[in-house]
Image (tube, coloured by chain):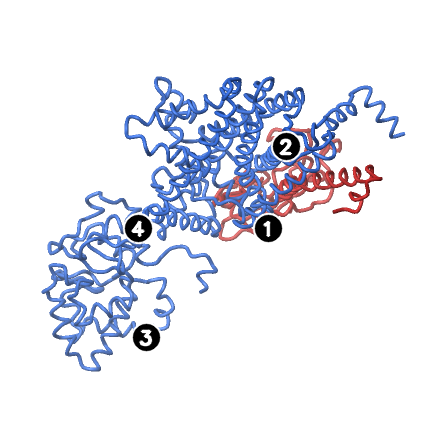
């Protein structure tokens, strides 16, 4: 019955004879390991098609959603990290396998007549696959892919005459955006794979037409493709898969950087490792000559590769081809090594990579917070995150004069001495306690480098506080608690709640004869004669925002302001930026539940 | 080494061993990417709607004009769409109607037949589904017995607090006679 059904089908489709023809191809000299590369590549391509289609079902090519959809696949969907991992690492493996396949073909002379056309098919397939890598690198729309691809398309733009127009066509407009993604995605998931299928069909057809290029001398009697060579191929594919799985498990899927942000510099931008040699090569071409490194020389080398079948006809041609390929591979390997080596010695790059990792980790925390990802995209999460932006803004705008601990808030060490107070833990009980110590008040961490070095505050601390009785010292502690409670610091919530009574007492003490705060400062009561910064709300968000906005305001230093610029009033920083600095100084940012519990 | 390989007399057995192994390995390695894809493909089955039924403020009592005249209101609430969280966005709509001075009737606008948005036709004083012509009386019951809808329009629980109307918004499974909340 089944046999009859098969016969019926065979008459109509010829499937059995086709299968037979496919499986029983003759292999002169028997199956060999050196013939496996083509099959491993076909397998890798199969993996890419399958995983690619499933990724496609969950990916959104738009600049507000691309990163977000990849984030969701990677972190929220069941098995998403494995799926993405397979696609990502198989792409890497394909590059290696392509090179091995090419080397085997060239060494065995499989490009020579009558197989020239098939060789050219192969070269085009190689380029299409690299095209897939290039387009695929951008799709997650993270900082890494964004900036690396930007470099690639800018290089395209230096092509004479047509460059700028081509660049616009590729990125779908004058700037990176929605249409860059839709175009790259259509290339990546439609045009290039389609072309690859067509060319691969031709490649395999031509390969079958001319038969395998058997390595001489033949060592064994001829065999058929099935099952001897198939088994070897299958084992090789298995080995490839095992290596891929190893990398996926080791890194728990591929990484996903912070979302692309054109306003956020990214010094860690590098192309995928197999393009590093081109990246390095470009460094040797001074301004104005980069077209040689980026386009002319690579094109000549590609031309030489394409011309191999023609060179091969000459007496020494084959040796030249083999030598040329080895030189090319060795050159690329050397350049890759140089690129890696330079980067590892470049302290700025190492810092940038670390920063990139931190941003990637942070944005994931924010995306998983109860607020989730807003419709405008995850990029806004980092932009409005005090933990991320605070140190950057502080280092850039404040660290010239102020310090944060021993550095600039970013882990850098500004040159020279500070000329204003240290703002680490500003407003906390610890900060105020240290400030009010006679030995501290006029050192560089507090008022020592300001024009208030010999002012009333310093005199008060150095003379009066230094001679405080034990009772007065206790009172001062309560005053510190009271002033610090004005800040409403998140980190001090517990202590403030516990010490309600002492804080209340401290509030009353502020105006007393012995504490003398209100001689210069205002506290809760309006005082026209006040000359020192307001203590009401001292260290609170509003207070800090206000002083950054304008320290010359009468609430703060008025005309007695030292050198501090009015960052807000003079439009050096906007409201959001000032708010981020204030929140960061106050340790007021989102903490995931786990960390907060610590 | 497989014992069959040492036996020169049975090339067929050796061939079979190789064939079986090839098929096995080929099958396993092909299955890996497919299995990874299928796993992700089935992820939606793990996801359920946020528990409905919480009271959502829909309108002020004063917004309802006459007794016995339904009016349509959007239901605004937070919504999660895969990675996006929308704090305030329309998640559906209801018809609210005063049945007397104190009681309000709330009907989900979705037709219980196939989920189309049911229109209120003021001239005929009836609800009419534009898709398959189901018609419903003002109390939500099926009016024309030839209507394809298997049940009355879905009534929702209503509360009035301080002059504001709150509705326990909920969608129900379409196409069945029972009123089964959508999960």
Mark 3 sits on what residue? A501
Q: Nearer the viewer, residue B109 or A166?
A: A166
- The crowd level at tag 2 (other Cα within 10 Å; few <14, some 14-19, many 20+) is some
Residue annotated with mark 1: B51
Residue A392, percent from left and from top: 30, 49
Residue tagged by mark 4?
Answer: A579
C-alpha span from label 2 to label 1: 59 Å
Residue A129 seen in the figure: yes
Give the image quarter of residue A153: top left
Residue receiving disc 2: A35
Q: Chain of mark 3?
A: A
What is the C-alpha distance between the residues marked 3 and 2? 84 Å
- The CA distance from mark 3 to mark 1 is 44 Å
Colour-to-chain, red: B
Q: Chain of mark 4?
A: A
- The chain coloured blue is A
């Amino acid at each position: 019955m089944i046999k009859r059904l098969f016969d019926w089908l065979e008459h109509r489709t010829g499937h059995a004879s086709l299968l037979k023809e496919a499986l029983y191809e003759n292999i002169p000299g028997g199956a060999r390991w050196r013939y496996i590369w083509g099959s491993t590549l076909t397998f890798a391509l199969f993996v890419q098609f399958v995983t690619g289609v499933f990724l496609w079902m969950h990916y959104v090519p738009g600049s507000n959603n691309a990163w977000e959809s990849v984030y969701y696949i990677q972190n929220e969907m069941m098995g998403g990290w494995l799926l993405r991992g397979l696609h990502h690492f198989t792409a890497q493996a394909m590059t290696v396998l392509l090179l091995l396949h090419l080397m085997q073909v060239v060494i065995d002379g499989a490009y020579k007549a009558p197989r020239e056309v098939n060789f050219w098919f192969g070269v085009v397939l190689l380029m299409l696959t690299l095209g897939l890598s290039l387009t695929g690198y951008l799709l997650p729309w993270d900082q890494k892919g964004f900036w690396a691809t930007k470099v690639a398309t800018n290089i395209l733009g230096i092509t004479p005459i047509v460059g700028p127009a081509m660049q616009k066509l590729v990125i779908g407009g004058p700037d990176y955006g929605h249409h860059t993604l839709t175009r790259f995605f259509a290339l990546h998931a439609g045009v290039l794979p389609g072309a690859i299928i067509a060319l691969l069909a031709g490649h395999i057809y031509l390969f079958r037409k001319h038969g395998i290029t058997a390595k001489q001398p033949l060592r064994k009697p001829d065999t058929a493709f099935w099952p001897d060579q198939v088994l070897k191929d299958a084992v090789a594919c298995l080995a490839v898969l095992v290596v891929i799985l190893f990398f996926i498990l080791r890194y728990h899927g591929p990484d996903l950087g912070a979302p692309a942000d054109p306003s956020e510099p990214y010094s860690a931008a590098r192309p995928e490792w197999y393009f590093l040699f081109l990246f390095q090569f470009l460094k040797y071409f001074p301004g104005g000559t980069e077209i040689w490194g980026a386009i002319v020389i690579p094109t000549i080398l590609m031309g030489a590769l394409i011309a191999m079948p023609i060179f091969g006809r000459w007496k020494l041609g084959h040796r030249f081809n083999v030598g040329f390929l080895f030189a090319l591979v060795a050159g690329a390997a050397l350049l890759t090594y140089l690129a890696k080596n330079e980067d590892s010695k470049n302290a700025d790059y190492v810092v940038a990579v670390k920063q990139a990792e931190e941003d990637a980790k942070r944005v994931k925390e924010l995306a998983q917070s109860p607020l989730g990802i807003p419709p405008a995209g995850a990029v806004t999460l980092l932009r409005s995150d005090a933990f991320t932006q605070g140190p950057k803004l502080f280092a850039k705008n404040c660290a010239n004069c102020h310090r944060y601990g021993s550095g600039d808030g970013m882990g850098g060490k500004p040159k020279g001495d500070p000329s204003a107070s240290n703002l680490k833990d500003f407003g906390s009980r610890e900060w105020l306690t240290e400030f009010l110590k006679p030995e501290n008040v006029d050192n560089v961490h507090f008022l020592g480098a300001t024009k208030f070095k010999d002012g009333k505050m310093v005199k008060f601390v150095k003379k009066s506080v230094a001679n405080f009785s034990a009772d007065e010292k206790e009172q001062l502690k309560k005053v510190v608690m009271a002033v610090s409670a004005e800040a409403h610091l998140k980190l001090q919530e517990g202590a403030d709640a516990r010490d309600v009574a002492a804080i209340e007492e401290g509030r009353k003490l502020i105006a007393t004869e012995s504490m003398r705060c209100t001689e210069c400062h205002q506290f809760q009561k309006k005082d026209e004669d006040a000359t020192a910064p307001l203590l009401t709300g001292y260290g609170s968000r509003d207070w800090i925002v206000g002083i950054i906005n304008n320290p010359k305001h009468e609430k703060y230093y008025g005309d007695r302001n030292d050198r501090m610029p009015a960052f807000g009033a003079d439009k050096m920083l906007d409201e959001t930026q000032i708010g981020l600095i204030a929140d960061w100084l106050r340790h007021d940012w989102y903490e995931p539940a786990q960390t907060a519990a610590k | 080494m497989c014992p069959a390989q040492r036996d020169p007399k049975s090339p067929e057995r050796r061939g079979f061993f190789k064939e079986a192994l090839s098929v096995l390995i080929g099958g396993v390695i092909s299955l890996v990417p497919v299995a990874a894809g299928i796993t992700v493909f089935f992820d939606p089955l793990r996801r359920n709607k946020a528990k409905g039924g919480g009271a959502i403020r829909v309108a002020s009592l004063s917004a309802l004009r006459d007794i016995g005249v339904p009016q349509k209101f959007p239901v605004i609430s937070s919504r999660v769409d895969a990675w996006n969280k929308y704090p305030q966005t329309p998640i559906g709509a209801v018809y609210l109607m005063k049945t007397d001075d104190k009681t309000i009737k709330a009907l989900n606008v979705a037709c219980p037949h196939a989920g189309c948005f049911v229109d209120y036709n003021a001239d005929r004083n009836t609800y009419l589904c534009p898709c398959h012509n189901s018609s419903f009386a003002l109390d939500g019951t099926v009016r024309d017995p030839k209507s394809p809808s298997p049940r009355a329009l879905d009534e929702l629980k209503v509360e009035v607090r301080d002059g504001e109307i709150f509705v326990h918004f909920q969608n129900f499974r379409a196409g069945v006679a029972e009123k089964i909340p959508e999960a």
